[in-house]
Amino acid sequence: MKPITRRPAVLTAALGVSMALLAGASQSASAGDPSAAAPAPRRVIEKTSKIAPGLILKKYVDKKLPRHTFELIADLSTPLTLDVTLGAKSLPARATVSDMAKRAGALAAINGDFTNPHVGRPIHPYLQDGQFLQTVQQLGAVFSVSANEKTVTLGRPSLAVTATDAADSRVWTIDPWNHGAPAPGQIAGFSPIGGTQEFPPDHACSVRLLPKENYVFSTGADGGLDQTFTVDVAACQEEAMTRNGGVVLSAPPATDEATQLLSLAPGTPMVMHWTLGRPGILDAVGGTPILVQDGQVVVTPACSSSLCRSNPRTGIGVRADGKIILVVVDGRRKRWSLGPTLFGFARIMKDLGAVQALNLDGGGSTTMVVNGELVNKPSDGFERHISNAVLVLPGPDPGES
């Protein structure tokens, strides 16, 4: 996991690529990717539009493959802000990218992390305006930009959630967080963003914590966020303890963890700590796999799984000059765009100048919206309702003020 800090001076763009490379003419052979056979260089039509100061949209059309690629280039040294959003205020979360962009007043948006269609939630760790959504069984990779919009980090997160009794410094690990009931030996946490998808369990010993102060950046070595709460009530009961705008910590009855929770007296100050192992971040989106790292393609052309075959693709990356690129490539449309393989998409991201890049959800979820208009052609023929999106805002993020 290697951070990239944008330099004050604008560097020479690190594209270094011909349009033939973008079209895939130099790609190694890969099953199912029509551009991988390295034919003679072909003419690619490029159209550039200025969306706002610091935000450029580029469209690349290769009619021979065929392929339609759309690239947003965001310069975060301008007033632009990169943000993420769920499809709703809490789980389950489902909305179209267009609706999410409109609600946020975004200049542009693309689909984000893969969505678990059964429960309407991202499948990887996710952080939005300082609210940590969930622990997960498979971490994948996470893309984040620091709150000051200067440092980009891409890699596997170091996920941890703890609760500290500020009165006697006892520290408890909270796992799972908004991800199901606790097993014996565990304390589970449930916050308002868990919504109706993640209720505290029945037949549990629980404590309700009410927020006393807003979050602050942690001064600890692992970065993250700290927020002070006050114990409201601690009890074992048959019915689930309600959150009432706070956080509920629960453990199975007759366990050491339950005894520890019940020892907390009303009014006890508690500090909740959430971290992905990165200081100074308030937003993070997950995906898989990493496409480009340290300027090199890190996926293999040998993969033949459904994820690796020709499909619509969405990715996010950072160039050597610190500019963020948001890229979608249409697919599954015979006369419009066939879509690259995963390896081919990694090559496209690298050829567009990405020194770090992450694969986001693709297939029918691949969507780009600019100024309220859908600019690509989703393979379903319409926008899917998905759980999250990546946004480009015209100014500061109001959720972080």
Image: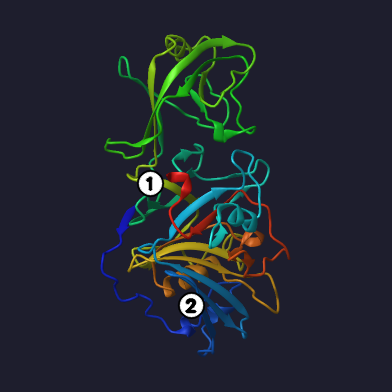
Q: Position of residue 156 (x, y in %)?
A: 40, 48
Q: Does 339 sit above or below residue 93?
A: below
Give the crowd class for mark 1: few <14, some 14-19, many >=20 residues within 10 Å: many
Judged from this view, the residue extending furthest toward the right is: 381
Whole-percent x and y of residue 269? 37, 18
Q: Name the amino acid type tagged 2.
A: Gln
Instruction: Tell me the quarter of the image containing the C terminus.
Output: top left
Element carrying mark 1: strand
* Residue 195 horizontal/vertical position (percent): 61, 33
Would residue 186 be visible to someone looking at this image? Answer: no
Indicate left or right for 361 with 279 as reference.
Answer: right
Q: Residue at x 62, y 86 (%)?
A: 64
Name the front one of labels 2 and 1. 1
Q: Looking at the image, which residue is at 43% across and 61% down?
A: 80
Say the numbered circle drawn on residue 34. none
Q: Is residue 363 left or right of residue 325?
A: right
Name the residue at 37% across, 80% down. Answer: 16
Percent coordinates x, y for residue 214 in the rendering: 41, 33
- Residue 79 placement, left or right of 326: left
Q: How is the image coloured?
A: rainbow
The amino acid type found where label 1 is placed reads: Ile
Residue situated in front as seen by the camera: 238 or 243: 243
To which residue does mark 2 refer? 27
Nearer to us in this view, 84 or 23: 84
- Residue that label 1 marks: 281
Which type of secondary structure does the marked residue at label 2 adopt? Answer: loop
Q: Is residue 136 above or below residue 112?
A: above
How far apart are the alpha carbons under marks 2 and 1? 36 Å
Quadrant of the rendered structure where residue 252 is? top right
Quadrant assignment, res 179: top right
